[in-house]
Image (cartoon, rainbow, N blue to C red):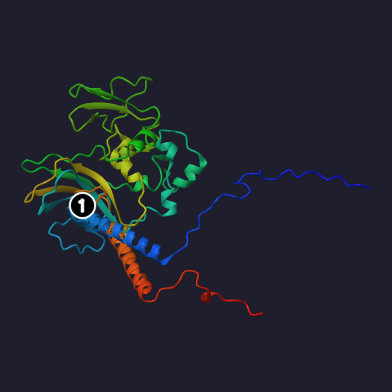
Amino acid sequence: MSTLECPPTKVPLDTAVRQQRMKAWTPILHPVWVILTLIAVGAAFVPLGLKFQAMSDAVVEYKRKYDSYDGNLNLTDDCGIDIANQGKNCTLTFNILDDMEGAVMVYYEIENFHQNHREYETSRDDAQLLGSLQQADLAAAQCDPLNKLGNITLNPCGLIANTFFNDVIKFVPGEGQTNMMEEGIAWTSDLEYRFRQPQGFESEECVCDTCSCAEGATSEGKPWSCDENNKHYVKSDGTCHKYYYPNEEVTQYLHETYPMISPLEGVTDEHFVVWMRIASHPTFRKFYGYFENGFKKGDVVTFVIENNWIVKNFKGSKSLVITTTSAFGGKTTQLGGCFIGVGGISLLAALFFGLKHIFKPRKLADEKYLKYKAE
């Protein structure tokens, strides 16, 4: 009785790649080539490291710590607060000792605040930040315990949005100094694709003298929101606006939680958008504003800070930083140091192997180094 044999069905194609017949080059680590390679790496990395270090040294940076959990700041300005949202005003002054050419960036720096904690970074509702008024169960669970306050829904919800850095930093222009710019500090992609006002939000410019939220209605016939006194909102440019937020009776919106946020912008406020992009380290800086024209040696740069964001609860501190930039960002010695270190080690290794090859060379494939198994 014969057995039927089935032809194989998974035979690889008879090609050089499938049958592993590709021509290959296997480098032989000849001492001369190894030494030359190490010299080339060192010759490239050391000058690059010195260049990167020089670029970092050319960055002019000033930093002032204005609040700390222990209060030991040794500052003439009494900026520390003991309770949140205290609204304490203080003045920080920077004496410019070197020319700050080009754009000057303004950052706030926070120490010992872990935005990278798993429970913190997932505590947000991205659909809500995009304007949705419907909340999924998963998003509600992630936002807990800052999803609702009794019967009032927080919009936006979550730990990130409701620990927003709400210190207000204002620049006091001196003679010949321009105002600090606070637009263009957030990622364009975030503003376009990740943050939008709630669905149904409307606003309308009106004449300040006759503007009344009690008069007129939205395009859908809804009464205007405005504030508790039924007053319109006045922008920094002096124009007046009426606005409407949906479900305002049972919702606390961002401008109600943080009054420094314009109700016309809400979650699209750039300071808020910058805060929502979490940091990976417990000590971090976030962009607050910038100057286009820089400062000259001898200038005095003055800021007035309204201190609201408390740091004592997590034993942290806050600083204000003004700095110029380079092609690699702000002042950093790590990049140049790494290149110099790698290049230096390569040159030392090349020197060691070179001396060994000169004074005690080893013939390539010398048979005396072969070890045979005893018969």
Neighbourhood count class around disc 1 (C-alpha, 10 Å): few under 14, some 14–19, many 20 upward = many
Q: Is residue 350 above or below residue 227?
A: below
Left or right of 323 on screen, residue 242: right
Splitting the image into 4 quarters, where does residue 284 fall? bottom left
Q: Is residue 332 left or right of residue 114?
A: left
Find residue 220 and report its image quarter: top left
180 to 353, vertically: above or below: above
Q: At 63% from the left edge and 49% from the top edge, which residue is drawn?
A: 19
Reading the image, the residue beneath label 1 is: 321
Report the front residue among 300 and 135: 300
Residue closer to the observer: 31 or 173: 31
Report the number of discs.
1
Which quadrant of the rendered structure holds the C terminus?
bottom right
Q: Position of residue 93 (x, y in %)?
A: 12, 52
Residue 187's x, y, as percent? 32, 39
Q: Secondary structure at mark 1?
A: strand
Q: Looking at the image, can residue 81 be seen?
A: no
Q: Is residue 14 visible?
A: yes
- Seen in the picture, residue 136 relative to 286 is either above or below; the reply is above
State the image quarter where residue 124 is shown. top left
Give x and y (percent) for residue 299.
Answer: 7, 49
Residue furthest out toward the right: 1
Q: Position of residue 251 (x, y in %)?
A: 39, 36
Q: Which residue lies at the image location 37% right of the left edge and 47% below the top edge? A: 160
Q: What residue appears at the point 38 percent right and 40 percent down from the top-left corner?
A: 156
Name the outermost residue toward the bottom.
374
- Kind of residue sitting beneath label 1: Val
Q: Nearer the viewer, residue 255 or 334?
A: 334
- In depth, the one of 169 and 333 nearer the eye is 333
